[in-house]
Image (cartoon, rainbow, N blue to C red):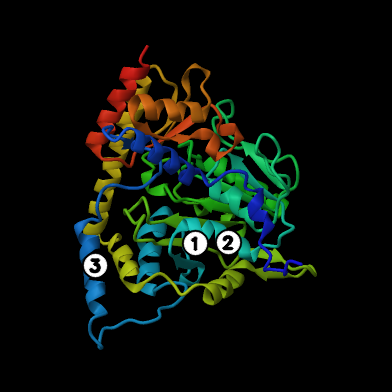
Amino acid sequence: MEEDVAKINDNYLKLKAGYLFPEIGRRVRAFAAANPEAKVIRLGIGDVTQPLTPTILKAFHDAVDDLATENSFMGYGPEQGYDFLIDAIIEKSYKPLGVDLKTTEMFISDGSKCDCANILDIFALDNTVAIGDPVYPVYNDTNVMIGRTGDADDKGYYKGLVYMPCTEENGFFPAYPKEKVDMIYLCFPNNPTGAVATKEQLKGWVDYALANDSIILFDAAYEAFITDPSIPHSIYEVEGAKKCAIEFRSFSKTAGFTGVRCGLVVVPEELEGTTSTGEKYSFNKLWLRRQTTKFNGASYPVQKAAAAVYTEQGWKETQANIDYYMENARIIREGLTAAGLTVYGGVNAPYIWLKTPAGLTSWDFFDKLLNDCHVVGTPGSGFGPSGEGYFRLSAFGNRDNVVEAVERIKKNFKK
C-alpha cells in the first residue's frame, strides 16, 4: 500500500501550457542549437538592454559602500520602503500630476510582477475578477493558481473569470462587463497592445467601479513612456479613483531595473472592502499587514539607486534611455508599416502590436519570423485568445539590432 504524501496545489495543473516566455525560450534554444551560425535578434520578452545610468550607478555603489562600515551599515529596513524613496516618488512623480499621496499609502517592492500577483492575498476568493483579453499573462495565471477559476475551455478562457476582449474593432480598449464584477485589472499603457487610455476613458472606468463597488487594479508599469501630454500617467488623476483603485508601478523598464528589481504599489487609505459579516475595512491596513508578514522589503542599495532616478541629473539620464527605446519603437513601427504590415502601439508605449500576415496564427508567425528572419517576438495568443492573429515586438533592443531586425523583416515580408 502506497503511503500518503504531501498533496500539491491542483490549481497549477489547470494551466494548460508553460508560461509564455519559457516556451519562447525553449523554441529559440532549439533553433539556435540547430543553427549555430545564425545571429538571432530578440525583440520578444520586454527586457531592457541599456545599462544603468551613471547617476543611478553611483548611488547604487555608494549605498553598497555604506554596508562596509559599522557606522553606516544598514540591516533590516522598513518592509513598506524607506521614506527617502517614497518621498521622492510622491514629490517628483505624483505631485506634478496633481496627485497628493501620503507616505503611508505607498509601498516599495521588488517589482510590479510580484505585486500584481501578491495583491490577491488581501481579496476574498469568491470575488469575481475581470481581465482584459489579450493581457499580461500574470493577471490570468495567478488567479488560476490561487483557485479562483475552473478549468479552461477550448479557447483558453477559464471558468470563473470575466474576459474583456480588446480588439481592433474596439480600439483595443475593454468594454464594461455585462455582469457584476468585484475586481478589474486595467493596464495602460497596455502590455501587449501598446494602447493608451484617455482621461475621459479612465473616468468612465472609475465611475463604473464606484457605481458597482468594484476595485480597479491599475498597472501603470509603462507610464514613463507616454509621449502625449493629454494622456494620464496615473489613475489617480481621475477624481474619485482613490476610493476604488490600487496602482502598480515599476522601475524595470523606466530605469532599467529588470535585474535590479524595484517597484511600488499605491493603496489609498480611502479604499475599503467589505468583511464576510458586512463591515467596511481598509485595504491599506490589510496590505500593510501582508507586507510586514510576508516581505522584508527591497534592499537598501536598490532603494538608494531608485531614489537617484528622481534627482535632476538622474531623471535627465533616465529620460534619455526612455527616448532611446521610443526611437526604437518608431523605427519598428514605421519599418513594418512600410513593409505592408498592419501595426498598432509604439507611440505612447514601448510595444508594437501587429497583425500577422496571410492568415498565419501567432505561433506560426513566431516560427516563420525565427526561421526566416532570425528574429524573436511574442505570439499574441500567449496573451489571451483575443490575441490570436497578432504579434508583439518589444522596443527594448540595441539600436543596431533593431535596425537590422526591421530590415530582415521588410526583406521577407514586403510585397
Kind of residue sitting beneath label 3: Ala
Kind of residue sitting beneath label 2: Ile
What number of labels is visible?
A: 3
Residue in front for this viewpoint, 201 or 403: 403
Question: Circle 2 sits on which residue?
Answer: 119
Residue at point 62% right, 67% down? 283
Could you tell me which quadrant the N terminus lies in?
A: bottom right
Residue 265: give its label.
1
Residue at point 45% right, 30% down? 366
Say whether residue 236 is left or right of residue 154: left
Quadrant of residue 135 within the rendered picture: top right
Q: Position of residue 231 (x, y in %)?
A: 44, 41
Closer to the chain start, of discs 3 and 2, is 3
Question: Circle 3 sits on which residue?
Answer: 59
Closer to the chain start, of discs 1 and 3, is 3
Residue at point 50% right, 59% down? 114
Closer to the chain start, of discs 1 and 2, is 2
Q: Position of residue 36 (x, y in %)?
A: 29, 35
Residue at point 31% right, 18% down? 411
Distance CA(mark 1)–CA(mark 2): 9 Å
Residues at badges 1 and 3 in contact (C-beta under 8 Å)?
Answer: no
**Secondary element at tag 2:** helix
Taking 334 as reference, is 394 above or below it?
below
Q: Position of residue 250 (x, y in %)?
A: 42, 56
Residues at badges 1 and 2 in contact (C-beta under 8 Å)?
Answer: yes
Kind of residue sitting beneath label 1: Val
